[in-house]
Image: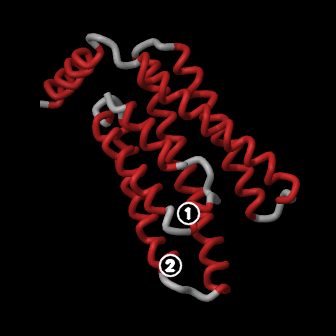
Amino acid sequence: MGFGLLIIGYMSMFGVMPELLIYRSWGIYIAIAGGLIMLAGFCKLEEYNVYFKLMKYINIIYILVLLGFTPFLILKQSDEFMADFLIVSKIIRICLLFVFHFFMFSGIKILSKEIENVKIEKKAKRNIYITYIFFGAFILELFNIINIDIVAPVMFLLGFVYYALTIILLYSCYMRITYEGHDEAVDEKYENRKIRKG
């Protein structure tokens, strides 16, 4: 179905932490490569629901934004410029990664509900709630509403847990959603929609 590609892409994209060093150097190309692998996965999944179709375009925007950052990271810039650039780019990454995770988990939630897989649906809902908390905390830290010295270790730990939970969710989808007859059922549903519209 495409969940295998999502696992590989997500693991190489390191998408959960907007302030990782990977986004500040040549390592950004690793994140771009991970985004391309995930794009291939979403191209396979887009027929299943509208969220996965939207994820294809969100993924393209993510890749283009990272490519847009590369000249500023590779070419020599002044320290003042880089300080401002890193703040602005971090805000963009926080917003983009929030949207990325929200739509991906929503797509999984809808798909698991359609096939009546309650366990995966619950995991997807849990990850959506954690997404609100995790990226909300980044916004609070960004505007100095909370003390970064106290929060940084907690955010790192929460980020690691969030990353692990996302991989586990994607792996659960890979193992349990693709079952015999499911693709045929989706194809039939897709054909029925085309007949109704036509």
Question: Which of the image's four quarters has the N terminus?
Answer: top left
Query: What residue appears at the point 83 percent right and 52 percent down from the top-left corner?
Result: 151
Residue 137 in the figure: left or right of residue 87: right
Number of marks present in the image shown = 2
Is residue 98 or residue 190 the one in the foreground? Answer: 98
Circle 1: residue type: Tyr
Task: Classify residue 7 by image quadrant.
Answer: top left
Q: Secondary structure at mark 2?
A: helix
Query: Tag 1 or tag 2, which sits nearer the N-term?
Result: 1
Task: Estimate the spatial distance between the alpha carbons at disc 2 and disc 1, rounded to whole Å.
Answer: 11 Å
| The label number, if any, that marks residue 72 in the structure image | 2
Query: What residue appears at the point 60 percent right and 76 percent down from the top-left corner?
Result: 85
Residue 137 higher or lower than 78, as above or below: above
Q: Position of residue 55 (x, y in %)?
A: 40, 44
Residue 28 higher or lower than 176, as above or below: below
Q: Residues within 10 Å of mark 2 (few under 14, many from 20)?
A: some
Q: Which residue is mark 1?
A: 23
Q: Are marks 2 and 1 in contact (CB under 8 Å)?
A: no
Query: What residue appears at the point 48 percent right and 26 percent down from the top-left corner?
Result: 171
Q: Position of residue 166 (x, y in %)?
A: 56, 34
Query: What residue appears at the point 67 percent right and 41 percent down from the top-left corner?
Result: 160
Q: Position of residue 190 (x, y in %)?
A: 22, 25
Q: Hey, which residue is sitting farthest bottom in the picture?
A: 78
Question: Which of the image's four quarters has the C terminus?
Answer: top left
Circle 2: residue type: Phe
| The label number, if any, that marks residue 196 in the structure image | none
Residue 96 in the figure: left or right of residue 3: right
Q: Position of residue 17 (x, y in %)?
A: 62, 51
Q: Which colour style is shown?
A: secondary structure
Q: Secondary structure at mark 1?
A: helix
Residue 72 in the figure: left or right of residue 46: right
